[in-house]
Image: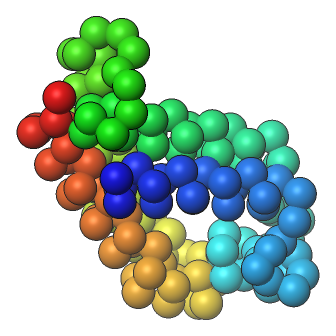
Amino acid sequence: MAVAGTLAALGGLHAVWSRSPWPCRDRDRFADLVVGVAPEQLPSAQACLGVAGLLGTAAYLVAARGGALPAIGPRRLRTTGTATVAGVLLTRALAGPLAFAHRTPAFVHLDRRVYAPLCLALGTGAAVVAARGK
């Protein structure tokens, strides 16, 4: 539930970001800290909503595979889906600090201290659920 709940919360946060730079005070600060780009390079609202949808789907897959939500569809689809969630998060955790090293210093700092470790924890949790879930 912790992994699924966190993924759902992150999905909600991405939905908020489609309309607002919360919790930052303005778009400039948000671009620097959260995305690591200039404000004019921020992703579109549609992109934020797309990521929100993917995170919501990931949350459902992990929760259903873990037995916390009713399972819909074939078991192997939930297993493969949850393993894919784990793979994406672990790839982001391990490759992100290298791939995003050219971004703003504030983002790079947060990526190394918060974003990548969070992805590592969520990816590891999703991998455990994929391997042991229902």
Whether residue 119 is visible: yes
Residue 4 is left or right of residue 134, and the answer is right
| Residue 86 place in picture, x, y as percent | 28, 46
Toward the left, the furthest residue is: 132
Residue 85's place in the image compared with 22, above or below, is: above
Q: Residue at x 89, y 57 (%)?
A: 19
| Residue 66 place in picture, x, y as percent | 25, 39
Q: Residue at x 63, y 44 (%)?
A: 51
Number of dots carrying numbers: 0
| Residue 101 place in picture, x, y as percent | 48, 76
Residue 76 is left or right of residue 26, and the answer is left
Whether residue 87 is visible: no
| Residue 97 place in picture, x, y as percent | 40, 73
Colour setup of the view = rainbow
Q: Residue at x 59, y 90 (%)?
A: 105
Location of residue 134 (image quadrant): top left
Location of residue 67 (image quadrant): top left
Location of residue 5 (image quadrant): bottom left
Toward the top, the furthest residue is: 74
Q: Tell which of 63 and 117 is nearer to you.
A: 63
Residue 112 is left or right of residue 34, and the answer is left
Q: Tell which of 120 and 36 is nearer to you.
A: 120
Residue 72's place in the image compared with 114, above or below, is: above
